[in-house]
Image (cartoon, helix red, strand yellow):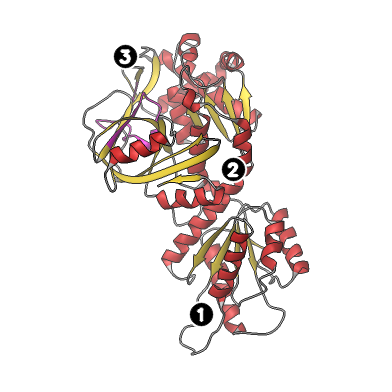
Amino acid sequence: MTDRVTHREVAPLGVFILGRKRPGFDQEWNRIICQRSVAALEALGYRCVGAESPVIDDESLAATFDKIEQAGCEALVMLQPSMGHGQLALSVAQRWPKPVILWATPERPGDGKVSSCSLVGQHLWGSSLRQAGHPFEFVYGDPGDAEVIGDLKRAIALGTAFSRLRKAKVGVVGTHAPGFIDLAADPFLLRRTLGVQLNPLSLPQFIERVHAIAGERAAADVRRVQEMGLRLVDVDEAALEMNSRCYLAMQDLMEEESLTALALQCWPELPNMLGQWPYLAVARLTAEERAVAIEGDVDGAISLLMNFDLGLGASFLTDWLDHDRDSIFFWHPGMAPLTMCNAVGSECGPALTNHFNIVKPLVVDAAIRNEGAVTVMRLWRCDERYHLTAFEGRTAEPPRKLTGNSVRVVVEGGDVRTRFDGLLHAGMPHHVLLAFGSHAETFRRLARLLRLEWHG
């Protein structure tokens, strides 16, 4: 994650400070640590709402939450600089159905007496929230400690992602690709588990939408694609118009239906009915952090959305093509986000060409960058519940060159065959997501917040 919050994390941040009705502990240290904590959050780019006055009872708690809710806050940080009233934990759980981020701050250094009992107080709150079945994240340490600030940013990102999933609306154009029954979605399990709304959409109407895009709009978008400088191999510029129409149609559909993610049944209908694969359009949209999945993979689209809402950047939805004891070779036929591919104009940079199987345009032929640390993750449903896995590795030279998008990942800890066997017997579908960076612990915590079955 970057040092400051990204454009997907612009919502104001709820911050409430638990105070005390009766004097106690070191109130000067209380004031100092509160000021430093709020200043650290503001330095990260958050606009803090609710920290103006301490919460000491149900009345002041209600007033603070009125401000937080009116501001549209998606995450909530709770400070307890001096141990306060533990009963209010249940009042907070009633008022705020999303995760609470408990930030325990340290004692005043070197004064020879207990100054705050902040960790004890937050321990009490955490235990109470857990026993009440309420999700929370926990951070402990000084606001001047870079590692603590990293933990805090992750906790806020998790709280934000949880909140956004509860409001997410995922469209599926058509259904899953023929035979790919492991990608089938259950709208009611999605709603019960993640809060996500599934919106089925007509494939024939989408095809009509593509054809109905105004010629002037399509031509303007073609010029934008031309300015990207992508090489053309065995195709000419006349192929760009239909992909621009697909790109604009998906944009329009997501806006008109208020979709936060989209799964598209891309074959065999689209290459047959439109004369093209929509893969360049998908590669552009995912590079712009729009959660768009192919082959009707609804849970894949939600997995993409999780990555974006956690601030992890673009992700590559891919097949697990083959593996050995220590590494996995990932591949898909040409729709990886352009931001994950080698640079345009480089020897292995992206080229626009035909699909390797149904030989029609327009796919992105480019290897994934050899970036170093990567995380492999996947959300799926099996046995009437949702599962999540994430594990880490490092990119390496692929065993061979393939058309489309491919990358080899050497898995941390090795023993890939045992890992694959366990995930396969847990029902994991044949698509997984690849993101740059080390994020397995973030996904473990997200699984805990959402009460998903975790496969580390």
Q: Residues within 10 Å of mark 3 (few under 14, many from 20)?
A: few
Tag 3–tag 2 contact (CB < 8 Å): no
> At 62% from the left edge and 83% from the top edge, which residue is drawn?
27
Mark 2 touches mark 1? (CB < 8 Å): no
Residue 339 visible at all: no
Residue at 44 percent of width and 14 percent of height:
276
Q: CA distance from mark 1 to mark 3?
A: 68 Å
Report if residue 322 lies within the magenta region: no
Kindly report the secondary structure that dominates the magenta region of the rendered protein: loop
Q: Which mark is residue 107?
A: 1
Which is nearer the N-term, disc 1 or disc 3? 1
Residue 117 disc label: none
| Residue position for label 2 | 165
Which residue lies at the image location 29% right of the left edge and 36% below the top edge? Answer: 328
Q: Is residue 94 shown left or right of residue 357?
A: right
Residue at 46% x, 48% y is: 443
Q: Element under label 3?
A: loop
Instruction: Write down the quadrant of residue 60 in the picture.
Output: bottom right
Locate residue 422, reporting x and y percent. 37, 39
Residue 27: tell me if it is visible. yes
Q: Secondary structure at mark 2?
A: helix
User: As displayed, is residue 236 above or below residue 348?
Assistant: above
Separation of residues labelled 3 and 2 (CA atoms): 42 Å
Q: Which residue is mark 3?
A: 234
Mark 2 or mark 3, which is nearer the start of the sequence?
2
Confirm whether the magenta stretch covers residue 332. Answer: yes
